[in-house]
Amino acid sequence: MSEFEAFRLRAHDWLASVAGTFGKAARKGLSEAEDLALGRRYLAARFDAGFAGINWPKEIGGQGLSHIEKVVFDTEEMAFGMPTVYFGISLGMPVPILIRFGEDKAWVKERVIAALRGEEIWCQLFSEPAGGSDLAGLRTRAEPDGNGWKLNGQKLWTSWAQYSDYGVIVARTDPTQPKHKGLTYFWVDMRAKGVEVRPIKLAGGDSHVNEVFFDDVRLDDSQRMSPIGGGFGVAMTTLMIERYVATDSGGFGPPLDLFVDLVKGLEINERPALNDGRVRSAIARNHAMRAGLESITARAMQMLQAGMEPGPEGSLNKLVSVRSRQKLSELAIDLQGNLGFAFDEHAPVKDNWTTSWINAPTGRIAGGADEMLLNTIAEKILGLPQDHRPDKGVPFNQIPA
């Protein structure tokens, strides 16, 4: 038995032992506040059991294992439906960036352990009303203020900001520079004076995203995590992590097995739906697609384990998986006829085809819209020339708005 298989069995046994307390069945019928409280208890139990920060250094509270063990554990954990959704962004992007770029190591360790135990949550403040997928087009500004900075502006689509204690943010510090060069990366206290969070209700009925306003928010220079004007590079590191952290070959929708179970009980023209060539073709295409995406992710994890940076191939994961989830969800609804119109806004996205379908457009925007991902694939993977960009090299304050 390999060391990875032994780890997988140990992780599975622990997860199975606590599933009755924290798993999918235990969460059914809970309010969001109750589910969040359960999630905090689960993260504390996971930390105490030695399954938190699996691939992070031991000196900051992690386990010091490889990225492979991290993927193994995440795969096992996903099957139990644990209440981790509130902490996914926090532990997936802002906290790893804090580990890498935070200068006060004692403070960083304190924050990392608190985040791993579910005691604190971090958010990622990137998108804006006038600059969504075009991160370099942002207009939130940080101006020098004594020995620190004064932050003003608005961010949009910030996941779980309403529960966050801290956030990482990119702001414009020099509007006279071209748009990619005048940005600086900070962390911000979400409870600070001048920070206002307003939840946004989505089409599916939930409100996990927010708009966040900053009105003369004071930042110490110690909260700066990049060189002045060097924030775009740190932001790209964050997004490169996101392409692999926020990865699920099913596009975070129902598993393919659930579709097969559904069509087993349906008919097309008085014949079993599972015997229809179009249905079988959809199953085969989705199986092949998901296997291919999982191979890309496995390769990226091996690159990370070897000390290499994962490449732009991660853009394929989100682009293909969420698109395919939307199409498969639509097919599942169509096959059910009138029954497919039933909608329960509290139904989990991974268990319900109608909920999956109505929330899929949100997934296609979050973390980079399809068009941005297609550009990345064209330029970084296929080596095609860039589109004409009339604002390239132009000082930001001279770009028409």
Image (cartoon, rainbow, N blue to C red):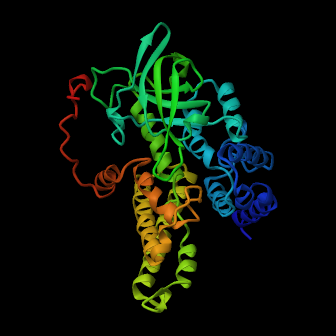
Horizontally, residue 24 falls left or right of residue 195, namely right
Q: Residue at x 58, y 79 (%)?
A: 261
Horizontally, residue 298 falls left or right of residue 65, namely left
41 over 343 or under it: above or below: above
The residue closer to the viewer here, 277 or 376, is 277
- Asked if one can make out residue 306 in the rendered structure from this viewpoint, the answer is yes
Q: Position of residue 69 (x, y in %)?
A: 66, 57
Q: Residue at x 36, y 40 (%)?
A: 132
Q: Position of residue 221 (x, y in %)?
A: 51, 16
Q: Position of residue 348 (x, y in %)?
A: 59, 59
Q: Position of residue 293 (x, y in %)?
A: 47, 65
The residue closer to the viewer here, 79 or 346, is 346
- Asked if one can make out residue 309 in the rendered structure from this viewpoint, the answer is no
Give the quarter of the image for residue 121: top right
- In this rendering, the count of numbered labels is 0
Q: Residue at x 45, y 84 (%)?
A: 280
41 over 146 or under it: above or below: below
